[in-house]
Image: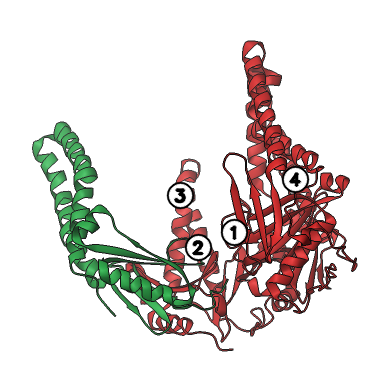
């Protein structure tokens, strides 16, 4: 079983910080401001402080934990992907059931030289397996390996 | 019968076989226009109501809007007839349509999940049928030829089956003859269908209809409505409610008869064939190899009658909004025949899920079931607390009790060829999944499950997923490993 590229931890932190700056920070400021206005400055700070700590921890620590819990491997017959810190999910996708494989890159992923591999089967509900944070060349090679396998697709 | 499939009528070689582009039958203009106008009227019912009830300039504007909608329906039907062309070319069905945005579609017979021939009253008058072809692609029929002659539709179906199964395969009529329907496996009588309609009664539809009626009456005559409501005695209100409920059940029974009247299931070397319908007759052919999942649903009322409903799912998505997938629904199957019917649909079935003992969920899953049941009913209890006070807490107890009963009824088995799962106390559901159709296997756990040493396994097939009850972690991991392996045989 392989781990993701360690650079993905920095990517996830950056993505979390972006979410923090564009959504959580304004919400937090408005909420703390309202509490401060109604109950005094110290109450506003007291209300905001635990949230700031919680957000900081999840922004800085969570990506490391998520990276540690993410594993994937291509075996003889299947692709195995393990993920999740609290909600753990392991999926086995038989190689001959794979319909198509995407590699995707957003602007931040491009900046880090990383790619996301997305695997689809005929189950059709959503992507069955997704491997973020792969080195570009590694993602391309893995995609080629996965689509090379042909067989009964079960449909 | 939808068509002349009961006999082995020889079908003459027609233009379908020459590979030339063909148009729909001219009578399709009428056959397609009437349902389209009906759909338009149904969609624009608020406008219709406003035209009839209102007056003045607003009503004139509404009338203009309504007229434009109907004109669009006429234009759509005309355009559809003028631009749709189809042909069989190199064994594949090709359909092109559209004027400005043209669409060209090629359907490979090997990818066809089922072929449906539909004949409504307008088709019947014109001597036509509609051919619907479903593959595993987008929702709805990928190939829809709305008005073909019976002969052309049968010939197309035979050719597509022939190309799908291979020349000389059993069930393929080599000369374009229409294959007989096959051996009858199940027929559903009128009283059984009434039973299905009653047990599928939708109280929600009654509430909705009553709400709309009150709203319209209130708008038409607010004073009369207010007087009527204030003067109504409790007994009269109860009577009105009972009448509305009976109306709901009658509505449900009528819908069932329209949809499933004279239901027949046949088995032939080509697969399964479902036929049903009162005004609109449907005939669906489904190759056995395309079956992804069999689900048996036994709501409590139907179970008391000694029946269940069998749903056969393929990778076809069905029409948007259809629930359950309409292509393989056996509305009323006697409980004692569940296993036999399942064995017909899945010939290699190596377990009788109603006779063989299923394995129970993990004992510690009971805590989760109790808490889950209580939480599900906590909202109802909170609402009722305004009237009942502390007595409303008993609702939470009922929720927990239902959770326990549901936990008791859960069961599962993994055999060399199949996965079986069962759940539900009020509505009992049994899923049978051929392991050869599994697309992916999933193992889940969350902090609460892990705290109790539990995990869940779920298998996905094309278009559906089935979960096993919560199991001990080690057991779930072993089942996950087992299901990753290919089935024997």
Colour assignment, chain B: red
Residues under labels 3 and 2: Cα distance?
A: 34 Å
Q: Position of residue B51 (x, y in %)?
A: 68, 20
Query: Which of the marked residues, 3 or 4, is nearer the chain's N terminus?
Result: 4
Q: CA distance from mark 3 to mark 4?
A: 30 Å
Q: Residue furthest top?
A: B56
Residue A148 percent coordinates (x, y): 42, 76
Inter-mark Cα distance, 1 to 3: 34 Å
Look at 68% across and 33% down and name the residue there: B75
Q: Nearer the N terminus, badge 4 or badge 1? A: 4
Residue under numbered circle 1: B317
Subunit bearing disc 4: B
* Mark 1 or mark 3, earlier in chain: 1
Q: Chain of mark 1?
A: B
For disc 4, the marked residue is B251
The numbered mark at residue B160 is: none
Classed neighbour count for the residue bearing mark 1: other residues with Cα under 10 Å, few (<14), some (14–19), many (≥20): many
Secondary structure under badge 2? Answer: loop
> Secondary structure beneath disc 3?
helix
Q: Could you say whether the residue bearing mark 1 is in a helix, strand or loop? A: loop
Q: Are marks 3 and 4 in contact (CB under 8 Å)?
A: no
- Could you tell me if the residues under marks 4 and 1 are in contact, i.e. CB atoms within 8 Å? no
């Amino acid at each position: 079983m392989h781990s993701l590229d360690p650079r993905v931890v920095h990517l996830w932190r950056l993505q979390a910080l972006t979410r923090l700056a564009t959504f959580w920070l304004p919400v937090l400021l408005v909420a703390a401001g309202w509490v401060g206005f109604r109950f005094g400055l110290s109450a506003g700070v007291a209300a905001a402080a635990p949230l700031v700590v919680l957000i900081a921890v999840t922004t800085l620590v969570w990506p490391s934990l998520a990276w540690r819990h993410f594993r994937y491997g291509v075996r003889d017959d299947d692709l195995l992907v393990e993920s999740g810190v609290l909600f753990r999910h392991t999926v086995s996708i038989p190689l001959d059931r794979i319909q198509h494989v995407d590699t995707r890159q957003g602007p931040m992923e491009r900046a880090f030289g990383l790619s996301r591999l997305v695997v689809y089967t005929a189950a059709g509900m959503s992507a069955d397996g997704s491997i973020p944070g792969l080195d570009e060349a590694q993602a391309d090679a893995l995609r080629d390996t996965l689509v090379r396998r042909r067989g009964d697709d079960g449909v | 019968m939808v068509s002349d499939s009961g006999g082995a009528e020889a079908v003459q070689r027609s233009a379908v076989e020459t590979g030339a582009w063909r148009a729909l039958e001219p009578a399709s203009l009428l056959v397609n226009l009437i349902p389209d106008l009906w759909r338009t009227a149904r969609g624009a019912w608020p406008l219709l109501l406003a035209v009839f009830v209102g007056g003045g300039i607003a009503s004139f504007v509404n009338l203009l809007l309504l007229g434009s909608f109907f004109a669009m329906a006429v234009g759509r039907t005309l355009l559809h007839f003028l631009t749709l062309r189809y042909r069989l070319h190199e064994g594949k069905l090709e359909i092109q349509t559209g004027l400005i945005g043209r669409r060209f579609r090629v359907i490979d017979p090997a990818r066809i999940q089922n072929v449906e021939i539909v004949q409504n009253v307008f088709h019947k008058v014109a001597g036509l049928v509609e051919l619907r072809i479903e593959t595993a692609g987008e929702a709805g029929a990928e190939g829809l030829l709305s008005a073909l002659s019976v002969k052309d539709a049968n010939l197309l179906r035979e050719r597509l089956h022939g190309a799908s199964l291979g020349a000389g395969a059993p069930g393929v009529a080599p000369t374009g003859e229409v294959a007989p329907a096959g051996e009858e496996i199940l027929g559903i009588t009128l009283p059984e269908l009434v039973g299905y309609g009653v047990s599928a009664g939708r109280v929600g539809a009654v509430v909705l209809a009553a709400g709309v009626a009150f709203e319209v009456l209130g708008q038409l005559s607010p004073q009369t409505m207010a007087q009527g409501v204030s003067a109504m005695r409790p007994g009269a209100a109860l009577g009105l409610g009972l009448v509305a409920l009976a109306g709901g059940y009658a509505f449900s029974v009528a819908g069932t008869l329209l949809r499933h009247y004279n239901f027949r299931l046949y088995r032939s070397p080509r697969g399964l064939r479902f036929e049903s319908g009162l005004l609109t007759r449907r005939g669906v052919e489904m190759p056995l190899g395309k079956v992804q999942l069999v689900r048996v649903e036994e709501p409590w009322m139907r179970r008391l009658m000694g029946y269940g409903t069998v749903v056969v799912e393929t990778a076809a998505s069905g029409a948007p909004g259809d629930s359950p997938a309409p292509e393989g629904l056996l509305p009323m199957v006697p409980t004692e025949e569940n296993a036999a019917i399942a064995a017909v649909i899945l010939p290699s079935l190596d377990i009788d899920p109603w006779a063989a003992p299923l394995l129970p969920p993990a004992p510690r899953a009971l805590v989760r079931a109790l808490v889950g049941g209580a939480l599900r009913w906590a909202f109802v209890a909170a609402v009722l607390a305004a009237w009942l006070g502390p007595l409303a807490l008993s609702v939470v107890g009922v929720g927990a009790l239902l959770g326990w009963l549901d936990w008791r009824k859960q069961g599962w088995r993994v055999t060399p060829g199949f996965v079986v799962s069962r759940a539900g106390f009020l509505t009992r559901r049994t899923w049978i999944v051929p392991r050869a159709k599994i697309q992916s296997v999933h193992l889940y756990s969350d902090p609460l499950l892990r705290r109790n040493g539990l995990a869940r396994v779920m298998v996905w097939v094309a278009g559906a997923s089935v979960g096993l009850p919560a199991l001990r972690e080690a057991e779930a991991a072993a089942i996950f490993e087992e299901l990753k392996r290919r089935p024997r045989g």
